[in-house]
Image (cartoon, rainbow, N blue to C red):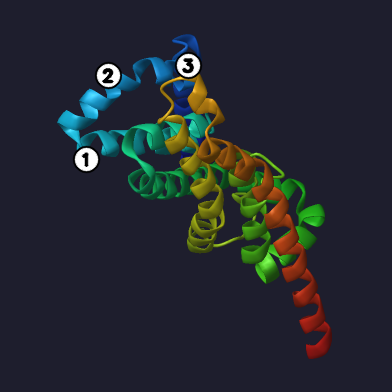
Amino acid sequence: MKPEVLKRLALVAVVVLFVGIFLYNDWGRFFTLEYVKQSQADFAVLYAEKGMSLIAVYMAIYIVVTALSLPGATVMTLAGAALFGFWATLVAVSFASTIGATLACLASRFVFRDWVQRRFADRLMRINDGIRKDGAFYLFSLRLVPVFPFFLINLAMGLTPIRVTTFYWVSQLGMLPGTVVYVNAGSELGAINSLSGILSPSLLFSFALLGIFPLAARKVLERVATWRGKKENIDA
């Protein structure tokens, strides 16, 4: 067996093993809002003692969760905002989510891309051409409007010829507005100490943003696409 094939099989085995351990030990219970709310006081004490070290651990876990396409990134975003505050969580999540997404893209490319490109070369030709021509804007639109789960985008982009550097900076930029919305919602959730807090204007506004943002982003992208189409017609 070729060394390249062995490396791919080894990577798949490691990922499957880690996911199996995650499921077997039910680590998913730690990625729920109920657990976060119950443990918020303990985490606050730990954060007061450890400070940046705890944020570094948080980022490392976030990267692993994103890279392995495990559930929990959304809850981690909300929990981080409730614990660390808006700005610290925004920076941490923005970089951790992008790094994790890039690792997932690279893993998909390393394991599957050659086989998929050989097997479906004719069908993928148009997609590959589109990615080479307009990959940055296409990826940006997928990041800005979450029509598909982000983990699927990470894996699918690994099968295309998009440059890793382009994937990274476009992902970081495209995910930033959504990250701002979720971090803001998490910081408001962390401030709830009673049932009356659920009806606070700031929290209601945060949840409204969660619903409005994808619609607003879609309208912006439609305007940009229309402008790009007109510009291409003029240039032609």
Q: Callout 1 environment at 10 Å: few (<14), some (14 to 19), or many (20+)?
A: few
Q: Which residue is denoted by mark 2 in the rendering?
A: 42
Q: Looking at the image, is 63 positioned above or below residue 29?
A: below
Mark number, residue 34: 3
Identity of the amino acid at label 2? Asp
- Does dot 1 land on a helix, a strand or a loop? helix
Q: Which residue is denoted by mark 1 in the rendering?
A: 52
Look at the image and tell me whether residue 226 can be seen.
yes
**From this viewpoint, which residue is outermost toward the bottom?**
235
Labels 1 and 2: the sequence-earlier one:
2
Labels 1 and 3: the sequence-earlier one:
3
Relative horizontal placement of residue 29, taking residue 52 as reference (left or right): right
Q: Nearer the viewer, residue 29 or 212?
A: 212
- Does dot 2 land on a helix, a strand or a loop? helix
Task: State the separation of the CA atoms marked 3 and 2.
Answer: 14 Å
User: Residue 51 in the image: x percent, y percent?
Assistant: 20, 36
Q: Looking at the image, is 27 positioned above or below residue 107?
A: above
Identity of the amino acid at label 3? Glu
- Does dot 3 land on a helix, a strand or a loop? helix
Q: Callout 3 environment at 10 Å: few (<14), some (14 to 19), or many (20+)?
A: few
Give me the residue at 33% from left, 46% from top.
88
Give me the residue at 54% from left, 60% from top.
170
Q: Nearer the viewer, residue 194 or 69?
A: 194
Q: Nearer the viewer, mark 1 or mark 3?
A: 3
Q: Callout 2 environment at 10 Å: few (<14), some (14 to 19), or many (20+)?
A: few
Q: Quadrant of the C terminus?
A: bottom right
Give me the residue at 58% from left, 42% from top.
205
